[in-house]
Amino acid sequence: MPKIKIIYDRQNCIGAASCTIVAPKYWKLADDSKADLLDSKMNSSTGKYELEAEVSEDDFTILKDSAESCPVQVIEIIKES
């Protein structure tokens, strides 16, 4: 199972919600019409939300698809191993 890091720039999210449709296990639309990366934590030095996890190859593919579906490209998926 690959270890990944998701970096999400929520401030620049426009609320298209494509990530929530592609990967609902990881993304949820919040009350302010922006997506929330579930179980993530704010990195105070970058202002971005981050989540490190071990995921299946299928989930890795789904997460990459969710990042690519974002019209403003505010989601970065990094495969660490």
Image (spheres, helix red, strand yellow):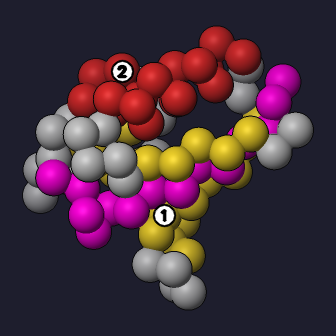
Q: Nearer the viewer, residue 71 or 60?
A: 71
Q: Earlier in the sequence, mark 2 or mark 1?
A: 2
Report whether residue 35 is seen: yes
Density class for disc 1 (Cα within 10 Å; few <14, some 14-19, many ≥20) is many
Q: Which residue is at the far left?
A: 32
Which SS class for mark 1?
Answer: strand
Q: Residue at x 52, y 29 (%)?
A: 63
Residue with the mark numbered 1: 49
Residue 7 magenta-drawn?
Answer: yes
What span is colored magenta in the figure?
A: 1-14
Q: Residues within 10 Å of mark 2 (few under 14, many from 20)?
A: some
Q: Is residue 64 above or below residue 61?
A: below
Query: x%, y% of residue 79?
Result: 74, 39
Q: Is residue 24 visible?
A: no
The amino acid sitting under disc 2 is: Val
Residue occupying image coordinates x 28% and y 22%: 21
Identify the residue position indicated by label 2 in the image.
22
- Image quadrant holding the C terminus, namely top right
In which quarter of the view is residue 61 placed?
top right
Spot occupied by residue 28 in the image (x, y as percentages of width and height):
31, 39
44 within the magenta span = no
Q: Which amino acid type corresponds to the residue marked 1 in the rendered image?
A: Tyr
